[in-house]
Amino acid sequence: MATGRTHRPATRSRGIPEATVARLPLYLRALTALSERSVPTVSSEELAAAAGVNSAKLRKDFSYLGSYGTRGVGYDVEYLVYQISRELGLTQDWPVVIVGIGNLGAALANYGGFASRGFRVAALIDADPAMAGKPVAGIPVQHTDELEAIIRDNGVSIGVIATPAGAAQQVCDRLVAAGVTSILNFAPTVLTVPDGVDVRKVDLSIELQILAFHEQRKAGEEAAADGAPAQAAGTTNSAVAAKRQDSATDQGPDGDVPAVMPA
Amino acid sequence: MATGRTHRPATRSRGIPEATVARLPLYLRALTALSERSVPTVSSEELAAAAGVNSAKLRKDFSYLGSYGTRGVGYDVEYLVYQISRELGLTQDWPVVIVGIGNLGAALANYGGFASRGFRVAALIDADPAMAGKPVAGIPVQHTDELEAIIRDNGVSIGVIATPAGAAQQVCDRLVAAGVTSILNFAPTVLTVPDGVDVRKVDLSIELQILAFHEQRKAGEEAAADGAPAQAAGTTNSAVAAKRQDSATDQGPDGDVPAVMPA
DNA sequence: TAGATTGTTAATCGATTAACAATC
DNA sequence: TAGATTGTTAATCGATTAACAATC
């Protein structure tokens, strides 16, 4: 969209489906690994296996970016790394601030996966005055009072919130007011933001709860009927012969598990 | 479902869509907050707003669980908290082990959101002998050698991997061999597991990359044409008047942002 | 040319949402 | 009863996938 394209033809450019965007980093990681092993080309089948997805899906995903493959040959690894990086905006520098330098904030500051992909930790910010000046991952923590100045001086557009839930919305408001337009939220709260601001949420507890749901299904399958809360089901683990499971990231299991016993 | 409701073409029981399962924890959190404020009932409209979703979607989600609302009134908060908790399997105890007690592992061990929802950190495991016995979040770290015994003795079926990428698959294999059937993976690797084992992945770097993609779009919109990699776009943030954005967790933005300037 | 593999089509499946009849 | 709100329908949209023609 961006530019007002009229008809259909002309690069569908900005029409990349969200589901595809979410998989590009996965492909990029697999490609980077191949690149490090100096593998020159890769087929959709091989790359899909490495990324844990269906090869038809991968080819469809790539078709949104353009025709970067060669029929009968495959994809040039280096070229594809570049194209995907560019598409994701990783060929430019993204200064990022992390707010809330507790255990999680420190873990994020130390996370190596950022720097290698265009992200640069521009500042660490915490509300605790005692933290000010203390270096974490080699970067001195700054006090929340400096938030606005830091955002402006560094041209930060991406903020990471790793504060307690109670402080998250307030921090979010300040980040947005200072010019941040993308937020990665680790606090267990729903953030309210104005239009034009993107929020992505990572919630540890929610992921575990989803696992528990499926785990309960497995336990119910082999043991008693599901009506009776088998009480000890949490500890009932054995190798259930379920079905699916291939990729990672999104395990869309369940569906309808065949009952082991009649009703 | 639970009890075998007869009519209604055999309980659609296990037919809860994955997308719905993923939202149940969100509803549960909002309901818990209402419960703490002693709010007795809530309408789909109010609850949906609190959870950051569309109210029609919420009602449809709840319809998979059963008819727990009252027309003209709304939903009983306490009752719904119980029903969702039960559906997610949170009314039982889930012993969990965390493997890899670095910054992230420690953050997870300290995370309060677990205990309150049926999850109990049964053990912290690390490969570094120097860590053994050292308490983290009040729990002494144990050495990887003990992994199998810990899993078995505690009946652990859920494992959290917070190791470096290089160690993740090996740890995963040992967890699975010892009886774990659900894994929450924080290591940036695609894990291979046998059928019947669920893996969910949390990837900090991927989330940031998705944000960067959308951020780049915003920058491209207000500035030059999209073909030219505007080089400094990373620092170009202003308040673009986009559209959508309401919930959290999944911001499926983009789509087609109205252009600010003509082509 | 023969073999391999992409890029695309089309069918299918699942998720979202507005609308409204049912009913408290 | 009148007003409110659920539970469900049905239309729509988006994502997945097998299959295969195009083409290296």
Image: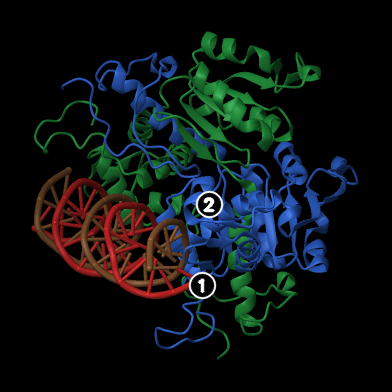
Chain colours: A blue, B green, C brown, D red
Which residue is at 69% across, 35% downward? B164
> Could you say which quadrant of the image residue B104 lies in?
top right
Furthest residue toward bottom: B262
User: Which label sits on residue A47?
Assistant: 2
- Which residue is nearer to you in this view: A181 or A29? A29
Q: Residues within 10 Å of mark 2 (few under 14, many from 20)?
A: many
Disc 2 chain ID: A
- Which residue is nearer to you in this view: B57 or D12? D12
What residue did someone put label 1 on? A66
User: Circle 2 — which element?
Assistant: helix
**Where does residue B135 sit, x and y in percent of width and height?**
74, 18
Which residue is at 44% across, 29% downward? B194
Give, as a three-letter code, the residue at label 1. Answer: Gly
> Could you say which quadrant of the image residue A227 lies in?
top left
In-image side of A201 versus B133 (left or right): left
Between marks 1 and 2 in the image, the one whose residue lies nearer the viewer? 2
Q: Looking at the picture, does residue A162 appear above or below residue A75?
A: above
**Where does residue A257 sit, x and y in percent of width and height?**
27, 32
Which residue is at 60% across, 73% downward? B218
Disc 1 chain ID: A
**Where does residue A261 sit, x and y in percent of width and height?**
20, 20
> Could you say which quadrant of the image residue B124 lies in?
top right
Q: Looking at the picture, does residue B11 appear above or below residue A233?
A: below
